Image: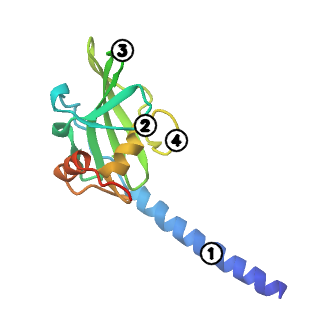
Amino acid sequence: MFERKWGIALCALAFTQVALAQLAGDDLDWKEAEVPTPPAFEIARLIPFEVTADSAIRFGLDPASISIGKDGVVRYVVVARSTSGVVTGLYEGIRCARGEFRTYARHNAGSGWAPAGNSEWKSIFAFGQSRHTLRLARLGACQENAPVQSAEALVRALKYPVQAP
């Protein structure tokens, strides 16, 4: 009986290691494409989306800024507006396959675009600054672990969100 439990445990461990090795192998082959310069955005064409009902910050996505790279990264400009009138643009990318996001650049009205400090891939599930990114992924930027099929599909998903029952 004791040997049987160990045998089952070893088989489970071997299966887990094979699965993790396959995931890691796929990830090792991935390379991010060259990131285009941040696109211009217009406040007038933003598609608003709600992150939390009680948030003092309102978010909108510029549909003209959406691109889906051959590397599987959905890139876009999202604009955050506070109730006091401060407007900040963020040029970001979501890597749906890994549940990660990256901020490439920030835009302030006075200084324009500036590269984001500490621009590395981070989990969209981490609490804090990525809440809008997680919401955007769930609204349609990601289809499970894959990027949305097209910019038009993401625009439709944002304009006409599916209501959960």
Residue under label 3: 84
Question: Mark 4 to mark 3: distance in Å?
Answer: 26 Å
Residue 14's disc is 1
The disc, 3 or 1, on the residue closer to the chain's N-terminal end is 1
Residue under label 2: 52
Quadrant of the frame with the C terminus? bottom left
**Whether residue 92 is situated above or below residue 28 in the rendered picture:** above
Colour scheme of the picture: rainbow
Q: What's the residue type where badge 3 is placed? A: Ser
Residue 126's disc is 4
Q: What's the residue type where badge 4 is placed? A: Ala
Q: Outermost residue, right direction? A: 2
In percent of the image, x 22 and y 57: which residue is there?
Answer: 149
The disc, 2 or 1, on the residue closer to the chain's N-terminal end is 1
**The one of 104 and 77 positioned closer to us in this rendering:** 77
- Cβ–Cβ under 8 Å for marks 2 and 4: no
